[in-house]
Structures are given as C-alpha cells and as structure tokens.
Image: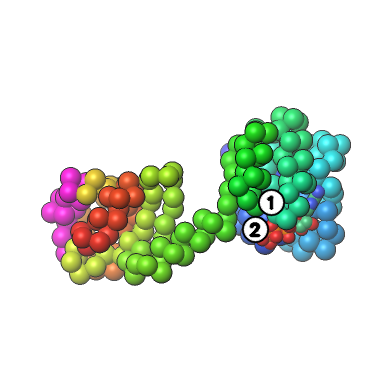
Amino acid sequence: MRKQFAVIGLGRFGTSVCKELYKLGHEVLAIDANEEKVNEMTRHSTHSVIGNATDEKTLQSLGIRNFDYVVVAIGDDIQSSILCTLVLKELGVKNVWVKAQNYYHERVLEKIGADRIVHPEQDMGIRIAQHLTSEKIVDYIELSADYSIVELIATAKIANKSLIDLDIRAKYGCTILGIKRGEDMNISPMPSDVILKDDILIVIGHKNDLKRFEEDGM
Ligand code: ATP
C-alpha cells in the first residue's frame, strides 16, 4: 500500500526528503510558510501548501492526522519546530520524525513525544569521516550506538574465496547481508558464493567487530 507522507519545512533537508519520497512513488504533502519554497516544490510533491505549521487549525484542515509519517524539518526556528511537533502529537499523528538542531532541542523533542529524532549533519559527518579514514568503506549506516551496517569494497586478499572459506561470522562475528557486483545485487548470499575483487560487501555487526574485519580480515 502506498504510504502518505507530509514534510514540514522546505530547507535543504526537508526539500531533499520530499523529493526522494516523491521519486520513490509515495504521496507527499509539502508544507512551508514561505511561498517561494512551496512553489519550488510543486513539481516534486503530490500537494504543496503555504501555511504556518505551528497553527493547529491549519494542520487539522490538511487532515494531517491521516498521514502515516510527518517529517518536521524546520531547522533554525527551534521554537516553531517544538510547537509544531507538539501540535502534531496532540492531533494524534502516529509517526512524527523531527530534525534536531542541538542536544537541548533533542531533549525537548523526546519529552513531547517525537517518535524519531534525526541529526542529518552529525550523521553525514560520521559517514564522511568513515569514508575519509578507510578506502575500503563505501557507505556506513549507524543502527545503534554499537551496531552498524557498512559497505566494504572487496580487496584482493579475500577475492576468489567463498564465504565458507572466509568464515567471517565465526572469525569476526559479522554477517554478510548482501554482495553487490556492478548492477547485480545478491541479497541472500550462500556459503558457496565466491567473492570477486571490487565486489561490494554489505556487512552488519558490532562496530568493534566490523573494524576488526575491515582492518585485519580483508
Ligand atoms: P537546511 O540546513 O536543511 O537547509 P535549515 O535547518 O537551515 O535547513 P531552515 O532554513 O530553517 O532550515 O528552513 C526550514 C524551513 O522551514 C524554511 O523554509 C521555513 O520557511 C520553514 N518554516 C519555519 N517555520 C515554519 C512554520 N512555522 N511553518 C511552516 N514552515 C516553517
């Protein structure tokens, strides 16, 4: 079933969330107080509306309660971000994801019931740092404080070996979730599958185990 999303605040972050959801074929309502920002988004959203998202009546009249997810991407104006989140939760929106500007903003958002708090700048900073420090890391997703998924480029050291030969799970406690080879994606690798140089391995595990595997195992 197609999900319904609303994105409030069309700065760089909100705009990119909105465009991507729309590209993925979802229904997206874009809301901003700034007319120009809203006009820019008409081509990249199902509906775009000019409005003050801290105003309960405005949100109610848009039927915001019926949306599966509402993303609050109001950045600098922390007061509006908090007020908007509060109104959304009071109106009964199930999933409210909010972009936090700083630690105190996050604490307040937690207290008023934001379902997920995101820090795009910090997350991106971590990913870029991972790229910079290891040529083998293509991408990095933090799942929790301890667990992550990384995409690693297969080196010559592990090339032409099968997963059973490499025995990564027993040796490093990490699991290979998938293997990308050019446009092909093997999402349920078999023990007998052989890795080729420059394949991209999608690996899940504890951060320490992933680091051990990346540094010593390949
Ligand atoms: P980025 O770094 O992603 O560009 P930012 O955090 O700097 O974002 P802002 O420039 O603060 O984001 O943009 C947030 C958007 O939210 C602006 O377009 C602004 O018009 C909009 N906005 C702020 N307050 C409200 C409000 N009460 N109702 C609707 N839109 C709002």
Q: Nearer the viewer, residue 191 or 25?
A: 191
Q: Secondary structure at mark 2?
A: helix
Q: Position of residue 215 (x, y in %)?
A: 25, 61
The quadrant where ligand 1 appears is bottom right
Residue 117: x, y in percent?
59, 44
Find residue 73 and name its label.
Answer: 1
Find out if the beta carbon at label 1 lies less than 8 Å from the nearest ligand 1 atom: yes
The C terminus, quarter of image: bottom left
Q: Is mark 2 within 8 Å of ligand 1?
A: yes
Q: Which residues are magenta?
A: 160-171
- Residue 54, image quadrant: top right
Q: Amino acid at mark 2?
A: Phe
Instruction: Say which amino acid is labelled 1.
Output: Ala
Contact between marks 1 and 2 (CB within 8 A): the answer is yes
Residue 132 visible, this orientation:
yes
Where is mark 2, residue-wise?
Answer: 13
Which residue is situated farthest in the front direction here? Answer: 104
Percent x, y of residue 57: 86, 37
